[in-house]
Image (spheres, helix red, strand yellow):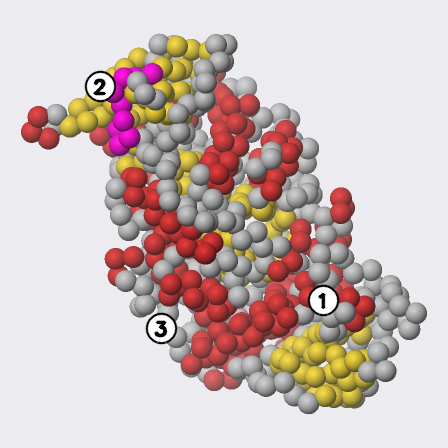
Amino acid sequence: MPPPPPATPDLPPELGVRLTDEGAQFSVYAGHARSVEVCLFGTGPEGVPTERRVPLRHRAHGTWFDTVPDVVAGQRYAFRVDGEWDPDRSLLHNHAKLLLDPYARALEGEVRLDPALYGHRVGADLRGDLWVRDDRDSAPYMPRCVIVEDEFDWGADESPRRSLTESLIYEVHVKNATKLHPDVPEELRGTYAGLAHPAFVQHLLELGVTAVELLPVHTFTHEPDLVLRGLTNHWGYNTLGFFAPHAAYAATSEPQGVLDEFKGMVKALHAAGIEVLLDVVYNHTAENSREGVTLSWRGLDQRAYYRVDGRGRDIDMTGCGNTLDLTHPVVARMVLDSLRYWVQECHVDGFRFDLAVALGRGKDDGYDRDHPFLVALRTDPVLSRSKLVAEPWDLGIHGWRTGQFPPPFSEWNDRYRDTTRTFWLRDLSASATGGIGHGVRDLATRLAGSQDLFDSHDRGTIASINFVTAHDGFTLADLTAYDTKHNGMNGHGGTDGSDDNRSWNHGVEGRTDDVDVLAARRRSIRNLLGTLLLSTGVPMINAGDELGRSQRGNNNPYSQDNEISWVSWDLEPWQEDLLATTRHLVRLRRDHPVLRQRAFFSGRQIHADGSMDLAWFGADGEPMGHRWDGPTVDVLQALYNGAWLSHQSVLVTLNGSARPADVTLPTAPGTTAYELVWDSTDDRPAPPGGPVDAGSVVSMGAASMRVWCAVEGA
């Protein structure tokens, strides 16, 4: 651990713990407290736990600090704070409650649910009177902060710094990825070391992944209502510490080893050319509402850390009981310090911000793209050079803000997800029963990079993170097998999870042995994957979709730490075929830069011969013209002109009808023929076919997609 920066007489030291020649310097913000103590834990005679309380004697600008002699790395510690108890004024100090350091870089132990964790008096049912302060000691039920060293042998580690135009993001849960992997040693399965194991890294490389996006790895705990039902928060969106890696994901139990194992994972992935992005949850914490547990921030300064109304009640824009107040400089600084720590000390390459709109809400609770926190991110010399991805919504009023984040943010494009599902599943279901769909205009917009959403401020196509599935929602296989969610195991009576799935079971709900239904489902999976991987923008795959993973119809398995969530590597032949298909599609994307350019297509003539950078055609091979909005239009052809960039041109043909279609391959300046390089009716990619003349009529299978490479001629 580096020494603290030189003291500035008029300013408090940096927050957190810094080792010095004299001991350890502790610094914590508690702006409305009367006193703060650091609690040092050890072991006395006969193994009896001890707690030594040391008052922090100095205070400046709401920060309490002091140097405690003879403290070294490995010391377990936490804080206690005394002050007023007045819920109406958001003052919830309670000296009986042990509080974690918001800047702790390692935690040991877990939160064990008990009424003593609550700052106010509650009973066995965890209900009580908010205005009666509880005097039971929470320390027996709390984890401990641990002082760790920052030193690590990074060797020649460097960030791969992959361009977003060449990126394939793989959203993955640390435990789910390798818990069942037969080629990962059993003791490493489901851990950081398991994710970095050559067997799993090889899978990523063969798939063409350039970045893993890890579901939350900040230390987290489980909501009381889940614990009472015998469940856990498996996904991790319930943060307990913004600077400490989640210890349960490590093969080791020693706190220093946990941090080193995380860093070793990053180093190994970088060596393979793979970036590491973290899904970070800075919109709320694990303390729930003010009626919830007191673990850290609430006991330090509820008024500073959380959004509250005039009566001290939490303003919940996250659905989790509280919302961190990024308008407060201490909170904004904590988040920025956390982000810089993960980049500078742990070498991560970027972040996906959960419910990012909540981070950009001002004092009037409205979203502001020029919010001071967002401006700080964009101007910080470290963070502005990292990959920044926003989940562009929250649960507050006017919470959906897709396309409204400033550069250099990219955004999860939910419009892309919904449109792609609608075309290949909902509209196809309507077609199969004699109905009509929604046409192809919106689909064409998504295929071309969603210019309607991301054209402002020169953001370009890389602002769109295209996805069809993610951790929350159906898997790709389940999208084609279930019309409705089956979430009974989550304990909410089946009411949790989205009802807007835009899925289609192809005539049978859930598992079936019907070969025709299975064939149709698998073709739909290939259509969805083909669309995703060949669209302009940045594709993101949900881990296991390339293997046909199912969650048995559960579209919200946040509490399922079991085979429902874990990726199975015991593949049937059709899953091997799907994996081969995914790899083939990724190679097509990699080998044809015209599919992944940064600038939006103009759709206008770019050459004297009349060619356009992107041209759209109907089933008859003629330009779409005024036919865009017809609900019966379900065949679309897109010709991506690479010739003007000295690349090969690509034709993508889609038939969204439940019936076969005769399609005329379009004629275009300089293109004499097309060579078929992929057909979604094939269970496994076939070798390229011979040239087919432009203007030829070809028969396409029902609900299918084809990719052709243009043959250029005089």
Is residue 13 rendered to the left or right of residue 423?
Answer: left
- Mark in front: 2 vs 3: 2
Residue type highlighted by circle 3: Asp
Q: Residue furthest right?
A: 608
Disc ID at residue 570: 3
- Number of other residues with Cα within 10 Å of mark 2, as a class: few under 14, some 14 to 19, many 20 or more: few
The secondary structure making up most of the magenta span is loop
User: Disc 2 or 3, which lies upstream in sequence?
Assistant: 2
Q: Mark 2–mark 1 contact, CB under 8 Å? A: no
In the depicted structure, whether residue 370 falls above or below residue 482: above
Question: Does residue 389 belong to the magenta stretch?
Answer: no
What residue is disc 1 on?
594
Residue type highlighted by circle 2: Arg
Identity of the residue drawn at 83% across and 71% down: 624
Q: Mark 2–mark 3 contact, CB under 8 Å? A: no
User: Disc 2 or 1, which lies upstream in sequence?
Assistant: 2
The range drawn in magenta is 67-76
Disc ID at residue 508: none
- Number of other residues with Cα within 10 Å of mark 3, as a class: few under 14, some 14 to 19, many 20 or more: few
What residue is disc 2 on?
52
User: Disc 1 or 3, which lies upstream in sequence?
Assistant: 3
The front one of 637 and 71 is 71
Question: Does residue 73 belong to the magenta stretch?
Answer: yes
Identity of the residue drawn at 75% across and 73% down: 649
Q: Can residue 420 be seen from the camera position used here?
A: yes
Quarter of image, res 639: bottom right
